[in-house]
Image: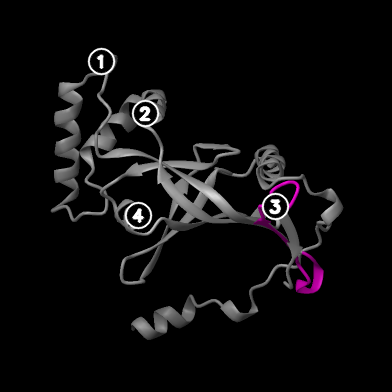
């Protein structure tokens, strides 16, 4: 029965495609540095009304070379890099501490765009972490304490019990301390690729590559799609 049921609801994955008809991306249109260009595209993504334009896929590599990816929210960007927050004991936290090389992917499908950032991650300072933590909703602050991220938990009830205990200890309006095992990472970019979907799969791919010899500190190169 499983085979019949699956056949009834199967989709022809190979036939799924979208024709990209958006305007192209030319070198003459790019900002001098990738952060300025990112901010321009990010503003476009926000204005488009898409859900969570700051959602990005963070890819890390374990000590034995196994890659892993997950979706995380961007919480800051400036000339120093791209910032997100997590439990330092999570899989990504452990992997980043052992191997700081990381990739970020912003999949802005409604605009037929994506941005790929590659670089090195380092922990942000505790003052910066504390400032962001205190800006989070009360429930999210409690959630950071309740969850031993990436570790096994016996049941949903166990997670909710831990949260309820914290809620009783720190009711709404009472300050929640910043967990010592929780904080931010800043990804300093070494390369940033801007991808624009084009007709006939002849996409535009323009990449900033860090280059100390260049006047701007960056070299821009076009890649085959």
First in residue order: circle 1 vs circle 2: 2
**Distance in Å between CA atoms under marks 3 and 4:** 28 Å
Assess whether residue 207 is covered by the magenta stretch: yes
Q: Residue at x 35, y 54 (%)?
A: 92
On residue 174, which mark appears? 1
112 or 78, which is in the foreground? 78
**120, above or below 65, in the image:** above
Quick one: SS at disc 1? loop
**Distance in Å between CA atoms under marks 2 and 3:** 33 Å
Position of residue 128 measured from the top left corner of the image (x, y, whole percent): 41, 29
Residue receiving disc 2: 133
Residue receiving disc 4: 92
Position of residue 30 measured from the top left corner of the image (x, y, whole percent): 79, 49
Stretch in magenta:
198-218
Position of residue 185 measured from the top left corner of the image (x, y, whole percent): 42, 43
The quarter holding residue 18 reads bottom right
**Distance in Å between CA atoms under marks 1 and 2:** 14 Å
Quick one: SS at disc 4? helix
Q: Is residue 174 left or right of residue 4?
A: left
**Distance in Å between CA atoms under marks 4 and 2:** 19 Å
Q: How many marks?
A: 4
Q: Nearer the viewer, mark 1 or mark 2?
A: 2
Assess whether residue 151 is covered by the magenta stretch: no
On residue 204, which mark appears? none
Tell me the crowding category of disc 1: few under 14, some 14 to 19, or many 20 or more residues within 10 angstroms, Cα based: few
First in residue order: circle 4 vs circle 1: 4
**Distance in Å between CA atoms under marks 4 and 1:** 30 Å
On residue 218, which mark appears? 3
């Amino acid at each position: 029965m499983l085979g019949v049921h699956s056949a009834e609801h199967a989709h022809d994955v190979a036939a799924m495609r979208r024709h990209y008809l958006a305007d192209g991306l030319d070198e003459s249109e790019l900002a001098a540095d990738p952060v300025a260009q990112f901010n321009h595209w990010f503003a476009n993504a926000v204005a488009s009304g898409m859900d969570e334009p700051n959602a990005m896929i963070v890819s890390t590599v374990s000590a034995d070379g196994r890659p892993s990816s997950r979706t995380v929210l961007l919480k800051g960007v400036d000339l120093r890099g791209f910032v997100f927050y997590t439990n330092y004991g999570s899989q990504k936290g452990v992997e980043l501490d052992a191997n700081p090389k990381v990739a970020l992917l912003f999949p802005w499908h409604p605009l037929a765009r994506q941005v790929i950032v590659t670089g090195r991650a380092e922990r942000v300072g505790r003052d910066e972490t504390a400032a962001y933590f205190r800006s989070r909703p009360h429930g999210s602050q409690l959630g950071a304490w309740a969850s031993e991220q990436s570790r096994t938990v016996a049941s949903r009830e166990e997670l909710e019990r831990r949260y309820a205990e914290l809620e009783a200890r720190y009711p709404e309006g009472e300050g929640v301390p910043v967990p010592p095992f929780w904080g931010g990472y800043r990804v300093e970019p070494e390369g940033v690729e801007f991808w624009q979907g084009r007709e006939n799969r002849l996409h535009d791919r323009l990449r900033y590559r860090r280059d100390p010899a260049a006047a701007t500190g960056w070299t821009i190169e076009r890649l085959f799609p």
